[in-house]
Image (spheres, grey):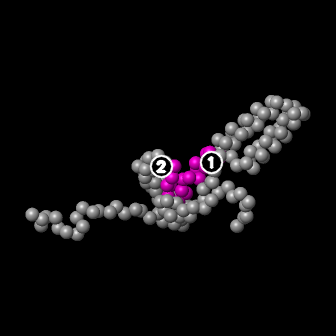
Amino acid sequence: MKFQLFPERKSCFCAFCKVPRKVYRSKNLSFATILGLAGLSFVLTNTIWHNFDPRGLIILGFLLITGEIFAQIKWRQSMICQNCGFDAVLYVRDPEKAGLKIKEFLDYRATRPEYLLRPAVPMPKRKVHASRGENISLRG
Ligand SMILES: [Zn+2]
């Protein structure tokens, strides 16, 4: 295992299929990435105008906005379980839609050979409380 001082991802378990997986800690750019983009915009500014130039700030802004968009897409994608298709963000917004997404993913998964060796998805059982073992028809 690789040691990281500030790990970008953390381990967790899928709320639906209970398979261990990793999600991104933050949905925004990390401080190290922002520093890297600032360095890149500095290099680009020096390459284009051979000196400090205020137009370099436009490059920095562009890089930060693009990086932020990609960081958010990456975070959103990591929220979806690769094993069962459970989407935690969608579940908070609309549980029914999240359930339909899982069903759709499981139908797709059943046709794909690459999922054959992956852990099975335990389906939640619906509990029936109506009769509780007694025969209702005998009640008067
Ligand atoms: Zn899952």
Q: Which residue is at the front of the view, 128 or 25?
A: 25
Q: Confirm whether the magenta stretch covers residue 95.
A: no
Q: In which quarter of the image is the C terminus?
A: bottom left
Left or right, residue 82 beside residue 44: left
Q: In this view, does 86 lie to the left or right of 22?
A: left
Q: Position of residue 111 (x, y in %)?
A: 48, 57
Q: What residue type is labelled 1?
A: Lys
Q: Is residue 73 magenta?
A: yes
Residue extending furthest toward the bottom: 133
Q: Residues within 10 Å of mark 1 (few under 14, many from 20)?
A: some
| Circle 1: element type | loop
Residue drawn at point x = 62 percent, y = 54 percent: 24
Marking on residue 27: 1
Out of 47 and 90, give the one closest to the viewer.
90
119 up-or-down from 78: above or below: below
Q: Give coordinates of residue 1: x percent, y percent.
A: 70, 67
Distance of mark 2 from mark 1, alpha carbons? Answer: 17 Å
Q: Which residue in the structure is indicated by mark 2?
A: 92
Q: What stretch is highlighted in magenta?
A: 71-89
Other residues around mark 2 within 10 Å, as few (<14) / some (14–19) / many (≥20): few
Question: Which image quadrant is residue 72 in?
Answer: top right
Counting from the top left corner in percent of width and height, residue 68 is at: 67, 42
Looking at the image, which residue is at 44% across and 64% down? Answer: 122
